[in-house]
Image (cartoon, coloured by chain):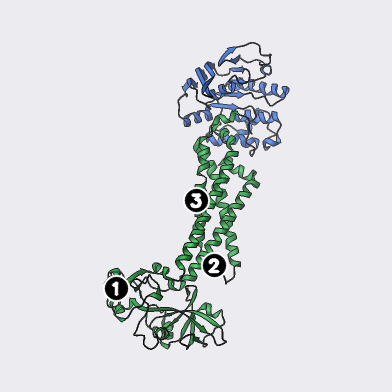
Chain colours: A green, B blue
Amino acid sequence: MYLALRDLLVARGRFALVGAVIALVSLLAGLLSGMATGLVDDGISGLRRLPLTHVAFQEGSGSEFSRSSLGPDQLAAWQDRLGDDAAPVGLSFFNARTPDGATVDLALLGTPPGSFLAADERGDDALEAGGLVLSDAFADEGIEIGDELTVVGPDITLPVLGFTYGGSYGHVSIAFTSLETWQNLVYGENHRDRFNAVALRDPGGVDLAAIAEQNGMDLYTKAGAYDGSPGFAAESATMSLIRTFLVVISALVVGAFFTVWTVQRTHQIGLLKALGASTTYVVRDALGQLAIILATATALGMVVAVGAGSLIGGEVPFRLEAGSLISSAALLIVAGMLGSLVALRRITRVDPALALTSQP
Amino acid sequence: MTLQLQDINVTVADGPDRLTILDGTTLAVGPGELIAVTGVSGSGKSTLVAVSGLLRRPDQGQVLIDGEDLSDAPDRRRATVRRDHIGLIFQSANLFPSLTSIQQLELVAHLDGKITTDDRDQLDTVGLSDRLHHRPGQLSGGERQRVAIARALMGNPSVVLADEPTAALDDARGREIMALLAELTTTRQTATVVVTHAPHQLHDPDHALRLAEGALHPTTDRDAAPL
């Protein structure tokens, strides 16, 4: 690394240019990472925060709440084996009018009082009372405790009893209510105790899959149930595709730079070998130099992404997570190093006798 | 002998045929001995340096450095011998543009990891102790070649090979460089081969040889310009 480090210091302008390109790619990767996480959050954070491990849906419903309809027999099948670790859940989308006439979207999640899904006693009390416990996001829209929201369609008015971090589902903020209220809203008086799915908390030692199969249900893990969120799978696939393209582009950019840089250094590499440097030494020197540029520029891009992310308003679903940022940065660095492999091959083949020719 | 070439043959592709560059070339250089090699352009002088300096493998023949036959040695071993036993001086100084004079020498020490020679002493030896922190672009042609000589002497090599070291210098600077090489050959007891277009710049080589038709021939006509 002796020569590589000094080259970096002396040819600052050249390395700063390529570093800037890598930093911009890294910035883009960081922003995309924030958007992907934000979109995922917007799609399933309400489901993710629930203390369940599995969800059982009607057979063939594909983990979509709106396609699944279960009844007391299926619930009993679970509760016979799991007791309170099985709870019925209804989840539907509604519009509601606020007292000042505005309309808000609700992802209304109904579960009975005493369900393990209710976070605490206050949650249970709210469910008993048959009102609404709203996600914090509704407070930003000016809704307050004590307000009454009228659910459009059935035109049933429900009081706002509290706020909680409920998250969202299908890009709509969650509102909790009792299962009975949810059933009245969805099915009317003749609901026959139907609901969408059974939320499960795996106690261990029980073959959940077998129970689901015996009772004509599909069992999903919590993460597996995310795909049922409207648009979630397509959004995730789109973001993954964009990130994949970005990584490939990054590898090509770094590979192209490193190849050009290697061609320019060919004589110097020959000279190093002529002075007795082994091929391993020369490769290590070149790779070390590239790794420093890649790591520095990528880190810089990510730092700028964090700064830019803090300026993005609440209208855009954007959330940066350290783990996601670090994995994006690591992926870019690995892709860059892989992109440099073509140039490395050239380095290993440089003839030391080149040192005897005139320097270009 | 420190450097020995025995029946060296080197050919290169010339269209569908092979062109012979060195044809049974034999050379032996001992410690403290300086050999001047002249020859017309294209006679194979640089190839002779390349083969002697383990930069190129001969098609046939043996290259021995300090008694070890390295003709068929693996690349890694040849690189190690280059580093530890051979000092190379090139036509243009071939310095690394990003390194100062002292760093050019430190790089060689870094390659080795064992060299204990004081880099500043080396630059003192070639009269450049006041140019330690200058980069090649800040040095004159003669100074650059002196740095190259100091670099070649790092680790006290037993063989020094100089490929037209004064080609880029005026005659006065060229004579200074040649005198320096002659002095260092004596004081360091190196086996030195100087390939040159200007043999008159060397005052008193132990042998002057002319490379022609792939073979080395003794010559006394050191003042004559090469053909």
Q: Callout 3: few (<14), some (14-19), or many (20+) C-alpha neighbours within 10 Å?
A: some
Disc number lying in front (3 or 1): 1
Task: Kindly identify which residue carries mark 1.
Answer: A216
From the viewer's perspective, is A83 left or right of A46? Answer: left
The picture places residue A298, in percent across and down from the top left corner, at 56, 54
Residue B143, percent from left and from top: 69, 30
Disc 1 element: loop
Tag 2 residue: A318
In the displayed structure, does residue A179 sit left or right of residue A337? left
Q: Amino acid at mark 1?
A: Gly
What residue is rendered at 68% in x and 32% in y?
B129
User: Does label 3 or label 1 sit earlier along the sequence?
Assistant: 1
**Host chain of mark 2:** A
| Tag 3 near tag 1, CB within 8 Å | no
Q: Secondary structure at mark 2?
A: loop
**Disc 3: which residue:** A334
In whole angstroms, how far apart are the C-alphas of marks 3 and 1?
46 Å
The chain to which mark 1 is attached is A
> Dot 2 surroundings within 10 Å: few (below 14), some, or many (20 or more)?
many
Q: Is residue B53 visible?
A: yes
Mark 3 and mark 2: span between their CA atoms? 25 Å
User: Is A284 drawn above or below residue B150 in the view shown?
Assistant: below
- Residue A136: where, in percent of width, then height? 51, 78
Q: Are marks 3 and 1 on the same chain?
A: yes
Quarter occupied by residue A220: bottom left
Q: Quadrant of the C terminus of chain A?
A: top right
